[in-house]
Image (cartoon, rainbow, N blue to C red):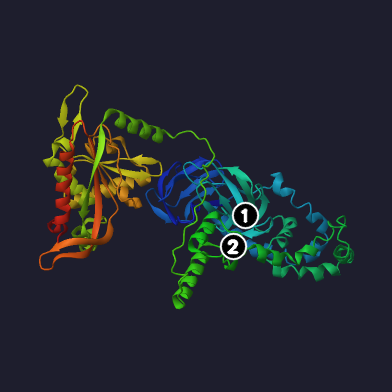
Amino acid sequence: MAVSVTLPALGESVTEGTVTRWLKAEGEQVEADEPLLEVSTDKVDTEIPAPAAGTLSSIKVAEDETVEVGAELAVIDDGSGAPAADAPAAAESAPAQEAQPEPEPAQEAQPQPAQQEAPAPSGGGSAEGTDVVLPALGESVTEGTVTRWLKQVGEEVEADEPLLEVSTDKVDTEIPAPAAGTLLEIVVGEDETAEVGSKLAVIGAAGAAPAAQPEPSQPEPEPAQEPEPQPAQQQAPVPAQPKAEPAPQQAQPKPTPAPAPAPAAAPAAPAPAAAENEGAYVTPLVRKLASEQGVDLSTVKGTGVGGRIRKQDVVAAAEAAKSQAAAAPSAASSAPRSPKLEPSPLRGQTVKMPRIRKVIAENMMKALHNQAQLSTVVEVDVTRVMRLRQRAKDSFAAREGVKLSPMPFFVQAAAEALKAHPSVNARLNDDGTITYHDVENIGIAVDSEKGLMVPVIKEAGNLNLAGIARKTAELAKKVREGGLGPDDMSGGTFTISNTGSRGALFDTVIVNYPQVAELGIGATVRRPMVIDHPELGETIAIRDMVYLTLSYDHQLVDGADAARYLGDVKARLEAGEFEGELGI
């Protein structure tokens, strides 16, 4: 039988992934759960395990190609038959097999005592078929908790259909079925935790294990169908009468719990009401989104499997609420909502310090112990720069192939000023000498998932605005995808830290030792300022303002040196003479 390898869901907001490397070639043997390929998304880099043992008969997606979640990546031949012919044969035989369970309601009435024995196979591990395994859901994720099964033992599933929901410390996601057929066995129950690669369930051929099929009458997704089987059960001579008598007995004497096991069908009637009161299951991410949007989940009707509330349902409810608020505005609706902060899973834990965190800590302490650091701050009007960027960003992106962010303007102004202020672009040596660099290699501090990284733009002083923008985009992509090499991180002579990217007005940054200075860029904020207009004189206008902070080693750089350097950077940005490089 041919088993399809598909791209699993790797997070609620992840819709596609790029195949970075195949670990097996066509024709090679693979084991179930053996790493088969590496996939990169905008959130994680992970390995995709083989869903079954066999021969890798076909690779559908080549390296460096991007596909959507659920797309077929490869085909594994498990050796049970011809890979290409078995799939349609199974599809053709499926209707014939599905037709058999329908005329068997009489058998459902008889094996009702055996219904209690049905759960036994779900933990016994004796079923044969395609294993459903917990895929790798991130580089540091080693286990996941099953939060909800969307299918029950005996139900038919389609390939890539959501089968269960899993929660990890990083993502809440759905695990799709690796193959079509019947869910024969559930190995890991709800609220149980399993390691990555472990077996969660078994899927067999379509129509297999009919004895386990009565179980789907127990879950909530089909409450409307539950009253219909009861008349059919009452027609059965033996089971109908005992079930009708205990129900009134349980209603009259409250303290008689002994006959409770028999009326298993009695609680079935109130079940829908209980489900409506409790509300459908939602993942923590959806619950958080509802809290941020101010949506009451008890009022949201889920469109997911079994009435599950999805992200789209919360967004739709939030949009509907906004429309109502716009139609009938009130003072209360205009008040800002405070976002609900979720407690971190690290609270109360003692964990080993990551290697990159140790390196950062050592460098920070070395910088503070070996330098006399202080900071100088200036305020810069970047209104002209922001207007230029707005005018040129579309044509720039079309011409250069990268987006034009404000960062290249600051990098170019900083690099030009370094040429005129050598003490800021220098190094103190252990023998008491000073090295004034003849090149401006500017490091850009980046906050990544792994920690603080400082890739370096080599010879930034010799690059134009477009060159700086392309190099910045290239390094940012390497940081996201984990492709930074030693050469990308070495050789820096000066560092720029965009502390305003998270809204900070300014920061007293620690110098990236052994450099002697580092520039911090604060958040750009629009606010009223007094300006000297050539015709109106002094007047108040709305301007784009930013704070620039220079931290430096006072052993080499004096406060006057720092002020002169910042003054030149300020003058370059406020003049905003970048039209020639932008082609406008």
Q: In the rendered view, does 576 fall on the left or right side of 1?
A: left
Task: Tell which of 95 and 450 is nearer to you.
Answer: 450
Q: What residue did someone put label 1 on?
A: 148
Q: What residue did someone put label 2 on?
A: 308
Residue type, numbered disc 1: Arg
Task: Tell which of 171 and 422 is nearer to you.
Answer: 422
Q: Percent position (x, y) of residue 238?
A: 89, 63
Q: Residue at x 21, y 50 (%)?
A: 410
Q: Residue extending furthest bottom?
A: 327
Residue type, numbered disc 2: Arg
| Element under disc 1 | strand
Q: In the rendered view, does 232 fall on the left or right side of 348?
A: right
Q: Percent position (x, y) of residue 400?
A: 22, 56
What is the C-alpha distance between the residues marked 2 and 1?
10 Å
How would you rate the neighbour count of disc 2 (Cα within 10 Å): few for under 14, some for 14-19, many for 20 or more? some
The answer to whether 213 is drawn above or below residue 490 in the figure is below
Disc 2 vs disc 1: Cβ atoms closer than 8 Å? yes
Q: Residue at x 67, y 59 (%)?
A: 155
The answer to whether 577 is drawn above or below residue 46 in the figure is below
Q: Residue at x 81, y 63 (%)?
A: 109
Q: Percent position (x, y) of residue 421?
A: 13, 39
How would you rate the neighbour count of disc 1 (Cα within 10 Å): few for under 14, some for 14-19, many for 20 or more? some
First in sequence, mark 2 or 1: give its number.
1
Q: In the rendered view, does 99 fall on the left or right side of 108?
A: left
